[in-house]
Amino acid sequence: MPTSTPVTPAPRAGAPPARASASAPATRTVLYFIAYPQRMAGANRSLFELVRNLPPRIRPFVVIAGEGQVADSYRQAGIPCTVLAPGGSLGTYGRGLMRTSRLQRMRIALSELLPFTLKLRRLIVETGADLVHVNDPRGALMAGPAAHLARRPVVAHVRGEIPFSRLARGAFVHGARRLITVSEGVRRTLPPRGREQAVTVYNGIRELPRPESPIPFLQHLRGRGVTVVACFASVVPFKGFHHLLRAAALLRDRGWAERVAFVCVGDMVEGYEKYHAWLAALAAELGVDNVTFTGWQADPFAFYASADVAVLPSVSHERAVIAGEEVDVRGNEGFPRTHLEAMVFGLPVVGTRIAGVPEQVEEGVTGLVCEPSDPAGLAGALEVLLRSPELRRKMGEAGRERVHRLFSTRAYVDGVMAVYDGIR
């Protein structure tokens, strides 16, 4: 059974939304379904930014597929949420389900997805939700059947490249009334019908809280004239940490060993222990000793405030040799929130030319964009910024102006509201 924080339901279960006057948009109850409950990574933080800034005419009902950081964050913010855990194979993550046989998937659909669907359908009807908003393709595949049984339209956020097979991708596209893509780069990866259904709405961000005190050891390094380069990302292969280590080695060979420090802030994600161990071995093999992995941090903003440059070496798709094994690395980057956060803090950004990154980072103005899977190009871009504190300052100021002008929370919420209002 689901566990929940008390929620005030709509006036009548299954009632249609209140009628609005010609001059005022309708009041709506929207059920937000979150399929990844464990971590408040970028996609979940972006939905959280939306939900906590909704206009009064939207009544949110948040359903999360399990306990974890996400439910904790909503409760701490005073936003009611219900935990409805599917259990069984549906409670596993990664891409294991996509590697099962068709017979196994049919068994899972009948024994696990069907009971979950019926429970979620009941919640949709009981709350009077007239719209279901899912935060990613997994959420669409989990919540879409319940929404269709309840005869409620689905709005699906596409926050990165869809990692599913052609068949599953087609089911996702056909199951949603409208798609919201976080960048034009992501919209272009959709099949033709998906591109027709999609509206691009950039993620938004507010002014972030300034920490009372920066990170002491980073401040100490900066006081000695060391430039601090920070990477904010979960430690998984597609974030490209192996390329960052190789770029750090190239910079060391150019004489920067004592003048730059790299700090990597992000979860050491369960299930990727082999990759984590290999990164440590690779750093030792390369002789790189100025890269620190901090693990998950409750307050990452103190690290932004203590850095000089932000970098994210993500890849979209590559064949990489990891721990002696050739691995097919596929990413799902869309519109990295870390770039927005870095710009709010006035940091110049170094990113890679994938997904929506070129739409975030104005090349040569707010930062630099290099090719993915290219440690030499990454090292070159970083060196440009390492050589010039004045350039870092100018790019940081331009980034702050750009994020407030183009990527505000207000613009983000208004864009999503326009999508809702177009669904009758």
Image (cartoon, rainbow, N blue to C red):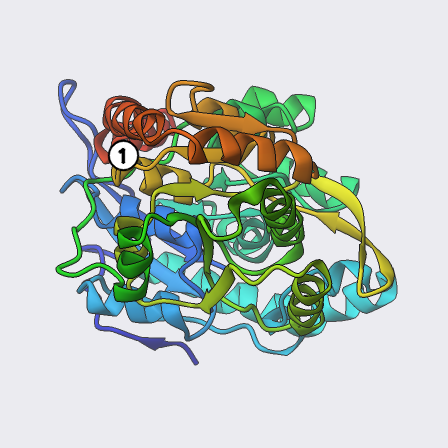
Q: Is residue 312 in sight in this rendering?
A: yes
Quarter of the image that includes the C terminus: top left
In depth, the one of 151 and 346 nearer the eye is 346
**Residue 247 in picture, x, y percent from top left:** 62, 44
Asked if residue 419 is positioned above or below residue 317 in the image, the reply reads above
Asked if residue 274 is positioned above or below residue 188 in the image, the reply reads below
Q: Residues within 10 Å of mark 1 (few under 14, many from 20)?
A: many
Q: Is residue 42 left or right of 275 when viewed as pictured?
A: left
Name the amino acid type tagged 1. Answer: Val
| Residue 387, quarter of the rendered image | top left
Instruction: Please name the residue that numbered disc 1 is placed on.
Output: 413
**Residue 89 in picture, x, y percent from top left:** 67, 73
In depth, the one of 381 and 329 nearer the eye is 381
Quarter of the image that includes the N terminus: bottom left
Residue found at x 33% / y 62%:
126
In depth, the one of 232 and 135 nearer the eye is 232
**Residue 146 in picture, x, y percent from top left:** 52, 56
Residue found at x 49% / y 63%:
292
Q: Is residue 146 left or right of 390 when viewed as pictured?
A: right
Say what secondary structure mark 1 lies in.
Answer: helix
Residue found at x 44% / y 18%:
364
Count of all numbered marks drawn on residues in the image: 1
Q: Is residue 313 in sight in this rendering?
A: no
**Residue 129 in picture, x, y percent from top left:** 33, 50
